[in-house]
Amino acid sequence: EALPPPGAPGCYSSHQAAAVNLRRFVGCAVREFTFLARKPGCGGLHVTTDACWGRCETWEQKPVLDPPFIESHQRVCTYNETRLVSVKLPNCLPSVEPTFTYPVALRCDCSVCLTSTTECVTSV
């Protein structure tokens, strides 16, 4: 699938995102992210990757005559296209496989959160 043209609304590369005012940004972008890769029986390893970052517009339409009486459109900034990368964690016990695999974001979009591929968490 072809990437949207540069400047398409809500779609930014990590280079374009750096030039955007992040406090006012509404949309979804690939952005560099560092995390500590860990698993039981191994040492941790700081990994820098590309992840999805942003704020997506959501809305509700009222009223709806059938339960739950509100039509809700909740979209999140999430992965559209990824590739998997594996690293070897340090100092693993002999019985522990040292490979740690994580996704690298190639393209991100504002879309519905799919529980089949994403941990969708809400807080009240």
Image (cartoon, helix red, strand yellow):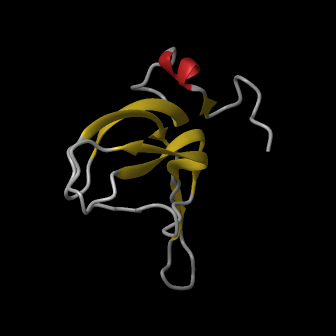
Compared across the picture, whether 89 is left or right of 73 comes to left
- Residue furthest to the top: 19
Where is residue 74? Give x, y as percent: 51, 58
Q: Nearer the viewer, residue 76 or 70?
A: 76
Which of the 4 image quadrants contains residue 64?
bottom right
Residue at image point 71% right, 29% down: 8
64 up-or-down from 102: above or below: below
On screen, 44 above or below 23? below
Of residue 122 and residue 104, the one placed in the foreground of this image is 104
Q: Quadrant of the C terminus?
A: bottom left
| Residue at the image point whose x is 51% and y is 63% from the top | 117
Residue extending farthest front: 94
Q: Nearer the viewer, residue 22 or 107?
A: 107
Residue 15 position by quadrant: top right
Give me the residue at 51% from left, 14% from top. Answer: 19
**In the image, is 114 to the left or to the right of 87?**
right
Residue at (38, 50) in percent of width and height: 100
Q: Is residue 38 left or right of residue 24?
A: left
Q: Is residue 7 placed above or below 90 in the rendered structure?
A: above
Across and down, in percent, residue 53 comes to: 46, 38
- Give the x, y percent position of residue 118: 47, 61
Q: Quadrant of residue 16?
A: top right
